Amino acid sequence: MLKLKNNFYGINDAVNLEQKQAEMLGYLIDHRMMTCSKRGIEEAVWLSQEVGNTAVRRYISAIRVKLSKAMGRDDIADNILVIANGGYVWKADISAKSSAKAKKQGYELRNLVFYT
């Protein structure tokens, strides 16, 4: 069984993400600046499991709320994790490994890794 160690450290708070939230966020970050379709996200996160029509939207919404609190920003949906062409795009210039630029801007991702 895979477990996920998943923390987001923002300027205001550290956030623990649920496993599926962390998997989804990791997928979007790995494909940053690219539109990720709902179907592509479902396949990456849930593999061959059946997923409800609103699952991706609900998870994206929950991730946005947590990121907003951690980063002290209210523009996550407009500038960080946006809807584009029927999918979602991670537009922030940070990766799953923290960078000096991200730290300077007040946020970073650490420990978004899988382990068994």
Image: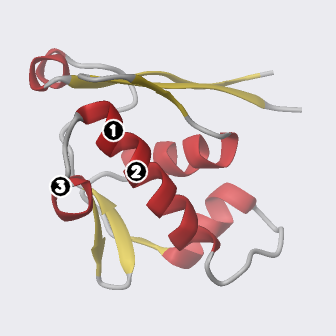
| Residue 20 or residue 27, whichever sits in front | 20
Residue sitting at x 64%, y 68% = 42
Residue at 40% in and 50% down = 65
Q: Amino acid at mark 3?
A: Asp
Marks counted in the figure total 3
- 52 on left or right of 113: right
Q: Residues within 10 Å of mark 3 (few under 14, many from 20)?
A: few
Residue 89 visible from this viewpoint: yes
Q: Name the element at disc 2.
A: helix
The residue at which mark 1 appears reads as: 69
Instruction: Report x, y in % for residue 3.
Output: 77, 28
CA neighbours of label 2 inside 10 A, class few (<14), some (14 to 19), many (20+): some
- Mark sitting earlier along the chain (2/3): 2
Contact, mark 1 vs mark 3 (Cβ under 8 Å) = no
- Residue 75: mark in rendering: 3
The answer to whether marks 2 and 1 mark residues whose Cβ atoms lie closer than 8 Å is yes
Q: Earlier in the sequence, mark 1 or mark 3?
A: 1
Foreground label between 1 and 3: 1
Q: Within 10 angstroms of label 1, few (less than 14), some, or many (20 or more) residues? A: some
| Residue that numbered label 2 is attached to | 65
Q: Residue at x 83, y 68 (%)?
A: 49
Left or right for 101, reference 47? left
What's under tag 2, amino acid-wise?
Val
Q: Is residue 49 above or below residue 17?
A: below
Q: Residue 50 occupies which quadrant of the picture? A: bottom right
